[in-house]
Image (cartoon, rainbow, N blue to C red):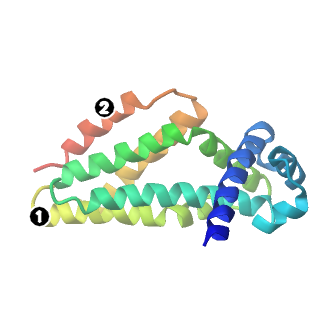
């Protein structure tokens, strides 16, 4: 058991240092050797934890998404909140996570641009990684419409509308380098209230 704990602890330390390499050099120019050097280990030892830089990068994204999803699911099952409050709280929680993980998001954008230059459609990758998030948003809208707390709306349109706030948050954090999303948070609170009956 202690070996597994130590292994995970070391993986997390590698991820932290790898993120710094990705930030300094971009995804394309980051190398396995640079990551090993930053971690103060050999490439051989690094291979014990990850098979290549893409796996390191994907593991970082997976960890962020797992944390976001755990927070969202706790909000989703909170019986003390109505539908408007749940949707609002979910989006604000995601924004808070974006503010916290701005470096990782910057590297994600770099990676998507890298894929695009190589002729890979980044939209497919993004959709694959966000399908569960979109499903959660849609289910919250469905729940609200069924309970009579939200106006009858097209679920797909409402889901796209809510997801567009997430895309806006990403743009503001990564491209515009905003320190916080306070203005967008106010807009979201107002906009979601418009769904209420």
Residue 48 left/right relative to 193: right
Q: Residue at x 35, y 35 (%)?
A: 185
User: Which label number is shown at residue 72?
Assistant: none
Q: Is residue 119 visible?
A: no
Q: Is residue 12 visible?
A: yes
Q: Residue furthest front?
A: 2
180 w.r.t. 87: above or below? above
Residue 105 left/right relative to 65: right
Disc 2 crowd, CA 10 A, few/some/many (<14, 14-19, 20+): few
Q: Secondary structure at mark 2?
A: helix
Q: Secondary structure at mark 1?
A: helix
- Give the quarter of the image for residue 159: bottom left
Q: Earlier in the sequence, mark 2 or mark 1?
A: 1
According to the picture, the residue beneath numbered tag 2 turns out to be 186
Disc 1 crowd, CA 10 A, few/some/many (<14, 14-19, 20+): few
191 w.r.t. 75: above or below? above
Q: Residue 26, percent across and down?
A: 77, 43
Tell me the distance, in whole angstroms, between the alpha carbons under discs 2 and 1.
25 Å
Seen from the viewer's position, the closer of residues 126 and 58 is 58
132 w.r.t. 42: above or below? below
- Give the quarter of the image for residue 191: top left
According to the picture, the residue beneath numbered tag 1 turns out to be 147
Q: Residue at x 55, y 42 (%)?
A: 101
Q: Residue 32, percent across and down?
A: 86, 55
Q: Residue 187, percent across and down?
A: 31, 34
Seen from the viewer's position, the closer of residues 21 and 8 is 8
Seen from the viewer's position, the closer of residues 105 and 134 is 105
Q: Residue at x 78, y 37 (%)?
A: 24
């Amino acid at each position: 058991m202690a070996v597994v704990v130590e292994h995970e602890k070391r993986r997390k330390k590698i991820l932290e240092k790898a993120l710094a390499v990705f930030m300094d050099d971009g995804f394309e120019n980051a190398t396995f050797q640079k990551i090993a050097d930053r971690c103060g280990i050999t490439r051989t030892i690094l291979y014990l934890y990850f098979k290549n830089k893409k796996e390191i990068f994907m593991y970082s994204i997976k960890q962020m998404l797992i944390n976001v999803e755990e927070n969202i699911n706790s909000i989703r099952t909170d019986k003390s909140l109505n539908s408007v409050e749940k949707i609002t709280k979910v989006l604000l929680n995601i924004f808070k996570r974006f503010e916290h993980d701005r470096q990782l998001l910057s590297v994600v954008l770099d990676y998507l641009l890298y894929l695009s230059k190589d002729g890979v459609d980044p939209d497919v990758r993004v959709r694959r990684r966000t399908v569960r998030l979109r499903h959660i948003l849609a289910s919250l809208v469905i729940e609200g419409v069924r309970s009579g707390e939200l106006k009858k709306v097209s679920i797909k349109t409402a889901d796209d509308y809510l997801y567009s706030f997430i895309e806006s948050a990403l743009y503001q954090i990564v491209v515009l380098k905003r320190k916080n999303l306070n203005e967008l948070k106010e807009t979201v609170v107002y906009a979601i209230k418009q769904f209420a009956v």
